[in-house]
Amino acid sequence: MPHIAIVGAGIRGLSSAAWLGSAGAKVTVFEKHERPGGVWQRVHGGAWINTPSYGYTFHSTNRWTSDKPSAAEILQNLEKMVRVCEIQSRIRYSTPVFGVRQKSNGRWQINDESQPAGRHPYLVHWLGLRDPRLGW
């Protein structure tokens, strides 16, 4: 099975890890913070999404109590997904990705040779914002 690097442990990165892992792929999720949640771990707990919750249902573990769940509820759902889908051991917390490069053999080098985070044949990028340091 392929080994896939996933950048970001937000809702899309975790959903990707859960789905790909259930299909038998080996995944490694790189997250710069100490816990999952992406942007939702950095917003005020009283914040909520401004789109209908079904637009945030990327995995069957997501269960919402309202049409516009709060940041706290989103984080609870993400932590549940990590637990239920058993992806905790696949997440490398406190591992910021400051660069990716495709090597001549086609594998993706995460970070550079001085601080390598591994080489992977496949890469999934789920950062919420464009980061020019990563080349996109």
Image (spheres, rainbow, N blue to C red):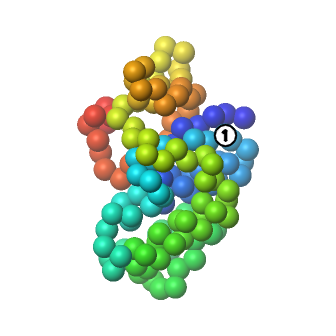
Q: Is mark 1 on a helix, strand or loop?
A: strand
**Residue to which mark 1 is pinned:** 26
Residue at x 63% of width, y 48% of height: 89
Residue at x 53% of width, y 20% of height: 106
Q: Where is residue 42 in the image (x, y as percent from the top left)?
A: 33, 63
Type of the residue with mark 1: Lys
Is residue 49 visible in this depiction of the protein? Answer: yes
Give the quarter of the figure containing the C terminus. top left
Residue at x 71% of width, y 52% of height: 22
Task: Reply above or below: 96 against 38.
Answer: above
Total marks placed: 1
Crowd class of label 1 (few under 14; some 14 to 19; many from 20; radius 10 Å) = some
Along the line of sight, the residue nearer the viewer: 79 or 48:
79
Task: Reply above or below: 87 against 56.
Answer: above
Q: Residue 84: which quarter of the image?
A: bottom right
Q: Position of residue 133 (x, y in %)?
A: 28, 34
- 118 left or right of 40 in image: right
Q: Where is residue 105 in the image (x, y as percent from the top left)?
A: 54, 15
